Image (cartoon, rainbow, N blue to C red):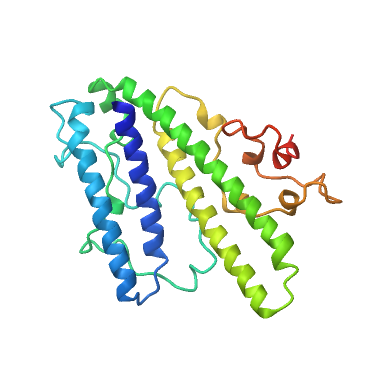
Amino acid sequence: GAATWLATSLTIEESQISLSRDVKRLQTHPTDTQLLKVARCRDKLHTQITRFLEMAPTYLGGDVDVNDPDFPVIVCNSLDDNYEDYSDFDEDQNPGPDIHDASIFQPELTVIPLPSNIGEVRCRELGLTNLMKEEIALQEGQANDALHAIRVHLGDKAVIFHNTVQSAKSQASSTRAWTRVRSVETAVNLNASIYSKCWSQLAKLPDHDLLTKYLPVKKEDLKASSVVADPNARGQRDTTLSWFWSLDVQGDTSGNDWMTECE
């Protein structure tokens, strides 16, 4: 039904964000293997988008042609326009190729005809009020999933610092520890980007007050805190964690030391 179709679009947007980040993290002179991987990902994403668009008239109305250039969607120049740039450790060292080159096939920049992208006025004209409500529920669920993942990965990062990085006895063990940190950092930043995309879409949808609960995530919110790794350590009681640590996401604040410290 419509909920499944909308859920597919959110999965597509996650893939767009992930691919866009992967492309940006390529070195100035990517290898043939890296370019081939990107090409394959773009082909797969293009197929997913094509199938999604084929079903669009079923849920947007039979007279709607999403391929019509006059069909109204709120277009962004890139997936990064509406939210903060969560840079990985090494992105500044390796400025990537221009992913906005119009001559390159880039399905990661395709605007999906979600109600939030079509706009409230046009949605009401098309009788899509219920579809807007369904998207709100799905965007909230996706935001919860992303925040949960952010908290898990930040917890992992804090533990790695606490137990591995600080206790590394050799250059080799230190390098391995920092490799783990970078991997976790990449996962944190990806989920922060996904969350912020949800937030920006919710901001375009009417008749809800979710933005009083879900706040924008800033770079400073994504710092791993020692209070997460060891909540009972001396001097931790006055440490302030970011707002999302005290948010009840999918009921996971019950029985969790990290969450208890925020209460």
Residue 216: quadrant of the picture: top right
Left or right? Give the position of 161 relative to 232. left
Residue 251: quadrant of the picture: top right
Q: Answer whether residue 217 is visible to the viewer in this image.
A: no
Q: Choose between 113 and 145: the one closer to the eye.
A: 145
Residue positioned most to the bottom? 171
Which quarter of the figure is the C terminus placed in? top right
Looking at the image, is 36 positioned above or below residue 229?
Answer: below
Q: Position of residue 72 (x, y in %)?
A: 22, 36
Which quarter of the figure is the N terminus placed in? top left
- What residue do we see at 30% from left, 58% from top? 41
Residue 169: quadrant of the picture: bottom right
Looking at the image, is 173 positioned above or below residue 135?
Answer: below
Left or right? Give the position of 138 relative to 212. left
Q: Position of residue 153 (x, y in %)?
A: 59, 51
Q: Position of residue 106 (x, y in %)?
A: 26, 57
Q: Position of residue 133 (x, y in %)?
A: 38, 23
Q: Choose between 176 and 64: the one closer to the eye.
A: 176
Q: Choose between 138 and 98: the one closer to the eye.
A: 138
- What residue do we see at 47% from left, 39% from top? 199
- What residue do we see at 35% from left, 35% from top? 7
Looking at the image, is 230 positioned above or below residue 97?
Answer: above
